[in-house]
Image (spheres, rainbow, N blue to C red):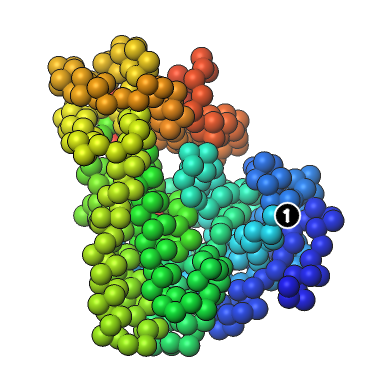
Amino acid sequence: MSAAQSSLSSADGGFRFDNSWARDLPGTYVAQPPNTAPAPHLLVLNRSLAADLGLDADMLAANPGWFAGGSLPQGAEPVALAYAGHQFGGFSPQLGDGRAHLLGEHIAPDQRRWDIQLKGSGRTAFSRGGDGKAALGPMLREYLISEAMAALGVPTTRSLAVALTGEDVWRDAGRLPGAVVTRVAASHIRVGSFQFWAARGEVDKLRALADYAIARHDPDLVGQDDCYLRFFDRVIARQARLVALWMGLGFVHGVQNTDNVAVSGETIDYGPCAFIEGYAPGTVFSSIDRTGRYAYGNQPLILGWNMAKLAESLLLLMDDPDAAVVALNARLDGVAGRYHTEWLAVMRAKLGLVGEDPADLALVQGLLAVMEATGADWTLTFRRLADAAAGNLSGLRMLFADVAALDAWLPQWRARLAPDAAQRMRATNPLVIPRNHKVEEALQAAEQGDIAPFHALLAQVTDPYRDGPDREAFALPAPSGFGDYVTFCGT
Ligand code: AMP
Ligand code: MG
């Protein structure tokens, strides 16, 4: 154990920081403090996450300045990290934390290491023309959706708090309350972190970063031959699983840029993300995704594209470039197959199928074709299939305009269904997800000063699998008057 770690003290219930990034990777960040908030106010605090992290929630609540900017917890060493990234396919050599500060790495009681990052905390060396700040709505959105994803079993960054700064920010919508979200992440190492040094030809820095990433996320690979290639395998495996889980839930990330792809395999950067309702693979929500590059059905392809960008960076670290190109290309050729295997496993679980049958793919595709033809609600279809597995077909049939097509599909599924499928399907297919109209309703109320609808929705989406009389208003799709949903990056 290093001296820094042995000096940690958790007795007071505060953060136990051990800032390995700041210590081990000089030159990959700029040290700077968060903006000083004029009137910090802690609006939302995640008490259950605090408990998991070994933090005393009452102590956190007594220090709003830690979460809005203005005061720093003991041991924090705020830094803004450098990274690059392909945004919508075009390379930006310098992005970096333009509105975020990594306070440090908190060591939880189980010795796991967590980045504690403020987002919306003011200008940094990487802000370019931006103000470094964030409006309340998008920060609450990140909190709500990341916590829903965690409850849905998806690897994700978490949200510890949302704090008001007491300062307004100016956006297209006008003057909005400024806020900061506190993000908790396994790390903030992105594909774009590698690209930053690769693009500059700074191989020593790139190697230091890769070795750091391996030590942090795949410590069993430290010192092994071919560790960079094996690390690449691990990242592919984590990302393939992640995107398969997104697809199973109807989740559209919306900005699958290489700077928003974490090598830890966590979902990161909840900007314009949203969940599909009626099934349509071409669904896009983000106002800036005009070509549909990051449409629901494109996410698996973009996964492969993003892994190719990581391969290009890792190539610089390998001794025999010709052999490395062959090895990396072989991995890239395997991404689609790897994803497909993960996706089929997700879909089998959603349909209550146990074991593997060669006809399963056709069975899944048959259902998707019927859903797509009638625009059946993604989430409710699978939830009502659980009821159908228990013998109650009425809810399912109501979702399909073309009931005959559904009825033609059902017998094959029934014949393949595991005996106790209904119960397991209810624990796999959520009843309540963050519905777009509910999210908007909650965020608008919060902007007007009423946080109660946010808490009501948060309670529902972090308990996604339960049935109950209180659930209906949260489980149903948007009323038709809600129209097409458009999301914004919130910058
Ligand atoms: P994002 O769309 O959140 O992934 O951000 C893309 C890049 O823009 C990152 O480098 C951000 O730090 C930066 N950025 C986003 N919003 C702001 C802002 N308000 N001020 C400065 N930089 C920003
Ligand atoms: Mg980003």
Query: Which quadrant of the view contains residue 307?
Result: bottom left
Whether residue 121 can be seen here: no
Query: Which quadrant of the view contains residue 430?
Result: top left
Question: Percent from the top left, x then y, of residue 115?
Answer: 61, 62
- Taking the view exactly as shown, the residue that stands out farthest to the right is 11
Residue in front for this viewpoint, 30 or 406: 406
Residue in front for this viewpoint, 382 or 280: 382
Q: Is residue 397 above or below residue 21?
A: above
Residue in front for this viewpoint, 382 or 449: 382
Q: Amino acid at mark 1?
A: Pro
Name the residue at 38% across, 77% down. 314
Q: Is residue 348 left or right of residue 420?
A: left
Where, quadrant-wise, is the C terminus in this rendering? bottom left
Name the residue at 54% across, 45% down. 143
Name the residue at 34% across, 12% down. 391
The residue tagged 1 is 109
Query: Which quadrant of the view contains residue 349?
Result: top left
Crowd class of label 1 (few under 14; some 14 to 19; many from 20; radius 10 Å): some
